Amino acid sequence: MRHFDLEMNDLKKRLVDMAEIVQQMIKFSVDMIVKRDLAMSKEVFNREREANLTEIVVDDTCLKLIALNQPVGTDLRFITSAMRINSDLERMGDEAVNICEIGEELLKYPDLKPLIDIPKMATAVNDMVRDSIQAFNLNDPDLADKVLSKDDEVDELKRIIIKDLLAFMTNTSDQTTLIRAIDLMFIAKNLERLGDHATNIAEDVIFMVHGKDIRHLKSI
């Protein structure tokens, strides 16, 4: 059991480290757009490789822990939650890469408008990512609840961004304006998805601690 506990602690540490990599990817991808610094995209792509390798190692570790130890109860919930969190973190990395790739096209043109709400949205999303993985690390369902409540703020910021960009698109026939507005809409959508993944992690934490599955309750 002692060896099993050490492996479980190592699994948790790998996920916390992976979450830190993903947070860096999100920050660099948004900073690239706000600061108009294409060099930051290299930082995102370098970290993507690290995140992808970590995903494979974590999945393999989880499967071995289940096969060799046949855990039950809290231990089994921890491992299955870790597998889902691992998947969400990898997809977060993909979203950061998507932002980067859109940003590379966006930076071919001058700024459409001062970027205010997108950095706000990115900050809110990064807070959700940080708090969701902290909730996992500390087995803290109360902190997970705070992440869930922040999702509405992210959705509202996306709504404001889309509304403002639609106004630009409605009042112009300039093709470059349309291209930039559409790119920024896609970036807002990527940020929203990042928030959704952080929400998934928070829900997994609540399941892990309490054994209560709260996914999709809003739609039931």
Image: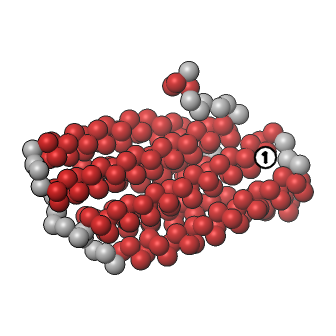
Quadrant hosting residue 42? bottom left
Q: Identify the residue at image location x=67%, y=31%.
A: 212
Residue 22: x %, y % from top left: 50, 62
Label 1 element class = helix
Q: Identify the residue at image location x=29%, y=56%.
A: 183
As displayed, is residue 16 above or below residue 217? Answer: below
Q: Identify the residue at image location x=69%, y=52%.
A: 83
As displayed, is residue 18 above or below residue 193? Answer: below
The residue lying toward the viewer, choosing from 174 and 85, is: 174
Q: Identify the residue at image location x=68%, y=51%.
A: 82
The residue lying toward the viewer, choosing from 61 and 209, is: 61
Seen in the image, is 109 located left or right of residue 30?
A: left
Residue count near mark 1 (Cα–Cα under 10 Å), binned few <14, some 14–19, many ≥20? some
Quadrant of the snapshot with the N terminus: bottom right
The residue lying toward the viewer, choosing from 144 and 51, is: 51
| Amino acid beneath label 1 | Asp
Quadrant of the snapshot with the C terminus: top right
From the image, tell me which residue sits under label 1: 75
